[in-house]
Image (tube, rainbow, N blue to C red):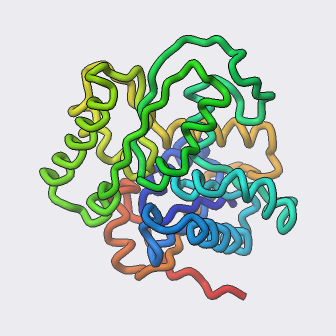
Amino acid sequence: MIGVFDSGHGGLTVLQALEHHLPRQQFVYLGDHGHAPYGNRAPDEIYALTLDAIERLFHLGCPLVVLACNTAAATGLRRLQQTWLPDRYPNRRVLGVLVPMVEAITGMPWMADIRTGQRGGRKRTVAIFATRHTVTSGAYLQEIGKRAPEITVVQQACPILVELIESAAPAAIVARAVRRYAALLMRRLNGVAPDAVILGCTHYPLIADLFAAHLPPGVEILSQPDITARSLAAYLVRHPVFGRATQTRPAASLFYTTGPAGSVSALASRFYGKTADFKALPKAT
């Protein structure tokens, strides 16, 4: 089984893509709805909550966990991969949605020998819409800059967008917020359209049409769920021990939450595209 973690519902967009690209894998989804949203929490608190969730998924039988939460990945993925994981769970793996996006933008593998300033690729501008904490962490800015310094990265925080999407706010209100964030980004760029846009939050694919409508025509909007799913599929080809495929389609994905299971399940279909029956996360043993 492969674990998928997010602070709330947003990771269900990633799970849907994972199921499509890896139909013979079984997935266990954990949403930390009881502590969502993460975007405005302190970094150390986000890191602690993330470690706890990963550990719970390990105990549920998942040797590999995908952090389908940009805030969690931006805050602590590299740190936990370099310290906590080798010390506590050397035979387990944790991957994140941030890594495949950096690889897709730069064309450079995450673990490549980075030699800043020596790539000489095509100059272009990439815009990132994300939560305030993902932007503040500078993770996308730093990781893209180390691999492809010729790429100009411009970030735009969208502080209330996750809350609007999670609460199923009226379409007009969501559209107004997206229009405002797009306008702020274009002001930073002096009206010059970026070459590509990363929707750096797993909630945002649900309203990708709004971003497209309020950005200049022709701007490429990268699909984080699809890119993450293709990256995981390639990873499992290289490391099959972390995701042994079944011969037939496996049982349906399992869903757990730290919040109220009933109300979480009621909203989940909007993100997942079909019914998702969440259960309360079992007590830690």
Exactly how many numbered labels are in the figure? 0
Residue 209, can we see it? no
Q: Find residue 78 and report its horizontal and vertical position in percent.
A: 71, 51
* Residue occupying image coordinates x 63% and y 41%: 99
Q: Quadrant of the N terminus?
A: bottom right
Q: Is residue 240 left or right of residue 224?
A: right
Q: Which of the two residues, 275 or 53, is positioned nearer the viewer here?
A: 53
Q: Is residue 189 left or right of residue 155?
A: left
Q: Which of the two residues, 169 or 267, is positioned nearer the viewer here?
A: 169
Q: Find residue 96 and report its horizontal and vertical position in percent.
A: 62, 49
Taking 12 as reference, is 215 above or below it? above
* Residue occupying image coordinates x 87% and y 65%: 87
Taking 271 as reference, is 135 above or below it? above
Q: Which of the two residues, 262 or 246, is positioned nearer the viewer here?
A: 262
Q: Find residue 258 and report its horizontal and vertical position in percent.
A: 50, 79
Q: Is residue 95 left or right of residue 19?
A: right
Q: Quadrant of the C terminus?
A: bottom right
Q: Find residue 11 and report its horizontal and vertical position in percent.
A: 48, 56
Q: Quadrant of residue 190?
A: top left
* Residue occupying image coordinates x 62% and y 71%: 53
Residue 168, can we see it? yes
Q: Is residue 26 left or right of residue 211?
A: right
